[in-house]
């Protein structure tokens, strides 16, 4: 069994420092999807304690092809905060994120 609070703290520290981290399942052993969501949920209070404000729930990707590219079997869900806002529109209509949404993974 994984220590969900410990892993949430590790993710939060990586996020704040802009650090690349290895996938948690590689460094801490496999865990199931419900545990992954509990880790995510444990991290939300850390963000809110820093003054971030919850904006809305995010879900996706829904298209099977997108999920396959990311090795996801199901859509993912989570809370977006004001620090995750998109700042600029790029050529072609894309957006560049100005805030931090998640630590970068290094495989």
Image: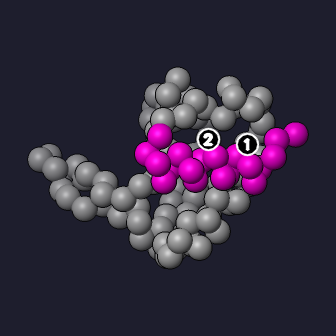
Q: Secondary structure at mark 2?
A: loop
Disc 1 to disc 2: CB gap under 8 Å? yes
- The dot on residue 57 is none
Residue 49 vertical placement versus 1 (above, below): below
Q: Is residue 7 magenta?
A: yes
- The dot on residue 33 is 1
Numbered disc total = 2
Would residue 60 be seen by someone viewing this image from the given angle? no
| Mark 1 surroundings within 10 Å by alpha-carbon count, few (fewer than 14), some (14 through 19), many (20 or more) | few
Residue located 75% across and 54% down the image? 5
Would residue 89 be seen by someone viewing this image from the given angle? yes
Residue located 77% across and 38% down the image? 32
Please give the range of residues in magenta. Answer: 1-19
Return the disc, 1 or 2, that comes first in the chain's sequence.
Answer: 1
Residue located 68% across and 60% down the image? 41
Q: How far across and how far down the image is residue 57, in percent?
A: 53, 66
Q: On the picture, is 21 further left or further right than 10?
A: left
| Mark 2 surroundings within 10 Å by alpha-carbon count, few (fewer than 14), some (14 through 19), many (20 or more) | some
Q: Secondary structure at mark 1?
A: helix
Residue placed furthest toward the right: 1
Q: How far across and how far down the image is residue 36, in percent?
A: 70, 46
Residue placed furthest toward the top: 107
Q: How far across and how far down the image is residue 69, in percent?
A: 46, 28
Q: Which residue is mark 2?
A: 74
Q: Nearer the viewer, residue 82 or 28?
A: 28
* Quarter of the figure with the N terminus: top right
Residue located 74% across and 49% down the image? 6
Q: How far across and how far down the image is residue 22, in percent?
A: 58, 30
Q: Nearer the viewer, residue 77 or 97?
A: 97
Specify the principal SS of the magenta part: helix
């Amino acid at each position: 069994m994984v220590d969900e609070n410990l892993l949430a703290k590790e993710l939060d520290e990586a996020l704040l420092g802009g650090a690349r981290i290895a996938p948690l399942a590689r460094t801490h052993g496999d865990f199931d999807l419900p545990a992954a969501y509990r880790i995510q949920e444990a991290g939300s209070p850390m963000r809110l304690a820093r003054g971030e404000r919850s904006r809305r729930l995010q879900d996706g990707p829904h298209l099977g092809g997108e999920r396959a590219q990311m090795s996801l079997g199901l859509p993912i869900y989570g809370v977006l905060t004001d620090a995750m806002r998109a700042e600029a529109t790029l050529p072609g209509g894309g957006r560049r994120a100005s805030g931090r949404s998640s630590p970068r993974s290094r495989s």
